[in-house]
Image: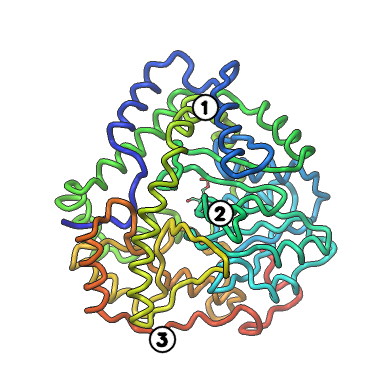
Amino acid sequence: MAVARTCINHTVRFDVRNLLRAAIRSRPGDAAGDGVVTAFERRFADHLGVGTCIAFPFARSAFLATLQAMDLPPGSEVILPPITIQPMVDAVRSVGCQPVVVDIDPGTLLFDQAQLVEHLNERTRVVMLTYLFGIASDPTPIIEAARAVGARIVEDFSHNLGATVDGRQAGAFGDVGIYSSSATKTLDTYGGGLAVTDDADLAARLRRAQTQLRVTPRSRLLAKVSGTLVWNLTSSHAAWTVATFPLVRWLRRRHPGVEQTISGARKPQSAPTGPSDPWFERFTAQQASVGLELLPGVAATDRVRVANAEQIRATLRYLGVPVPTGSDGGHHVHWQCVAYIEDVERVQRGLAADGFDTAGTNLRLVCECEPSSCHHPVARAVKQHALYLPCHPGVRAGALHRLTRSLARLRPMASVTLGTATGTNPTGPDGDRLD
Ligand SMILES: Cc1ncc(COP(=O)(O)O)c(C=O)c1O
């Protein structure tokens, strides 16, 4: 049997039930008067140990609302990581601010501290950090440096729900934490952007922004649920083995890079696009009730995935293959199990021949610098060399054993060069600004 690199964290039956509910409920997209959204927000906030959660339709909408709530003077600088989704950059531009991209550290996957400090100045109003792959890293030094210039902190913890550092939850360190509950995330509510904060003033402003969102059309909710259902069906063991994986492998041979193009991770730089209609539609009562149903089970699936990932990482370490380490005192959730592999194409082909699907991140390298004068060499290397290995709860003991044997047989080259962000490519004063 072939093994998919990732999975939907609920069953096909669950999706079918939700598709029917979305089709027949009287006002599926209307959260008004329905306490379910409020109940879910309360539960999610309690889960993280923060004061308030405000639900938006996407993480990008929650980020945009956060920037608006912060009342930033035009021309303010917002520091972003080079690996994120393009809409985060679009959100910054749409409020008249300047995105500034700073490279990451290969161990923590958060900003390189020295390069961050170089870019902080009196115009920096927001630092938006993004945890990657479920690796728990301590954002405290970043937060302290940002606060020293009066900047506020937003944490995108879409990959790190449940990850902690010294017992503190990712998403609860800064001013606002944002979680995308989109498909394949460990809590997946058919999309959603959950903003959490302990700041009463920001919470009130975010709540006002939420009340201005439009009713979500039934067609949108149906599209979200049916998209997930198709993904769930095509990645089920049997369908994956007989149809999907052979098709993926054929496409990869015929059209190298096709997945990156389909996912948007390798789109050429296009004219900047702004926020569009779906950004401003409500997180629905149905999505909230899905969240209430699934949230209590997240920790149990996390345990299985983390155990699988730790077993794979033990083999990788034995083989001398580097992995992101995070911080001391960090509890990783391994949304994806990542290895840094030099000869990534050979290893990917070898694993595919043994039935294991792998992939790089489909997040974009938003900096788009020329390779020869790249100011973000670590992010570029992570994008190029970080390979997702299947560790989800559908990977049973036998498959895990086969995967580690397969890795040992392939012996990935251990000499991957991720470099360090600082000093590798000196930047000019405005070298990293996205104009
Ligand atoms: C780090 C990160 N942030 C945000 C998102 C998605 O955000 P949105 O809910 O706006 O689609 C993803 C999607 O995979 C992600 O990986």
Residue at mark 2 to residue at mark 3: CA–CA distance = 31 Å
Colouring style: rainbow
**Which of the two discs, 2 and 3, labels the residue nearer the N terminus?**
2
**Which of the two discs, 1 and 2, labels the residue nearer the N terminus?**
2
Q: Position of residue 144 (x, y in %)?
A: 76, 64
Q: Position of residue 293 (x, y in %)?
A: 43, 31
Q: Nearer the viewer, residue 400 or 217?
A: 400
Callout 1–callout 2 Cβ contact below 8 Å: no
Left or right, 229 with reference to 277? left
Q: What residue is pinned by disc 3?
A: 415
- Name which residue type carries label 1: Thr
Residue drawn at the location 55% of the way across and 64% of the way down: 330
Residue drawn at the location 57% of the way across and 30% of the way down: 281
Crowding at dot 1, Cα within 10 Å, few <14 / some 14-19 / many 20+, comes out as many
Rendered position, 33 above or below 384:
above
Q: Nearer the viewer, residue 90 or 271?
A: 90
Q: Nearer the viewer, residue 287 or 317?
A: 317
> Which numbered circle lies on residue 86?
2
Left or right, 428 with reference to 108? right
